[in-house]
Image (cartoon, grey):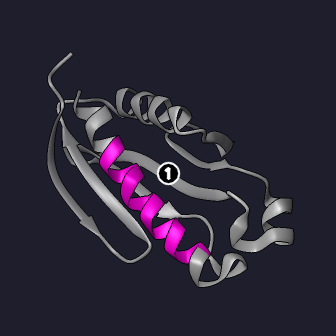
Amino acid sequence: MAKIVMVGSSGTKDSQTLVFSGGMVEDIADKAALYLGSRGYHLESGTKAQGVYGRGSAAARVLLGGFAKRMKYNVTIGKEGESVALVVAKGMTGLGGGLWGASQEKKELQTIISGLQGAILS
């Protein structure tokens, strides 16, 4: 297997895209799933390469708002020319948790992006 290197990244307020060269979609999807699993996320729907990863209880989030530890992210991994793009997008609005919940989700997205980058490049 070739060495995987990051060749680009871009982001918006609600998502981040990492672009890698030297790897296959399956390899990157496996590494992403392992990393997300280590952070307590599980695949709620879809596949490793195009799915929704979440942790915590949706019911608790409704009842307790931002005090409930509920996070959800949409992960899409696919070919982009000769490279592989990994897109992580917020799967929740943060409205149920108010400003505090939205702030938590923003911090968690950045933590996930940093961790995924490290996990995939290692």
What residue is rendered at 60% in x and 38% in y? 40
Q: Amino acid at mark 1?
A: Val
Residue 82 placement, left or right of 55: left
Q: Report crowding for label 1: few under 14, some 14 to 19, many 20 or more residues within 10 A (C-alpha).
A: many
Report how many numbered discs are placed on residues in the image: 1
The residue lying toward the viewer, choosing from 74 and 77, is 74
Q: Is residue 40 above or below residue 12?
A: above
Q: In terms of image quadrants, where is residue 63?
A: bottom right
Left or right: 9 in relation to 105: left
Image quarter in which the C terminus is found: top left
Q: Secondary structure at mark 1?
A: strand
Q: Which residues are magenta?
A: 101-115
Identify the residue shown where x is 49% and y is 40%. Answer: 49
Residue 71, how many percent across, how many down? 62, 58
Q: Is residue 87 left or right of residue 92?
A: left
Q: Position of residue 105 (x, y in %)?
A: 52, 66
Q: What residue is drawn where x is 49% and y is 51%?
A: 75
Could you say where residue 58 lies in the image, as x and y percent from the top left?
Answer: 79, 59
**Residue with the most extreme front position:** 67
Residue at x 81%, y 69% (from the top left corner): 64
Q: Is residue 70 above or below residue 78?
A: below
Task: Residue 45 in the image: state x and y as whole percent.
Answer: 69, 45
Where residue 4 sits, quadrant-wise, is top left
**Up-down relation of residue 49 to residue 63 (above or below):** above
Frontmost residue, 19 versus 98: 98
Residue that badge 1 annotates: 75
Identify the residue at the far top of this view: 1
On-image quarter of the N terminus: top left
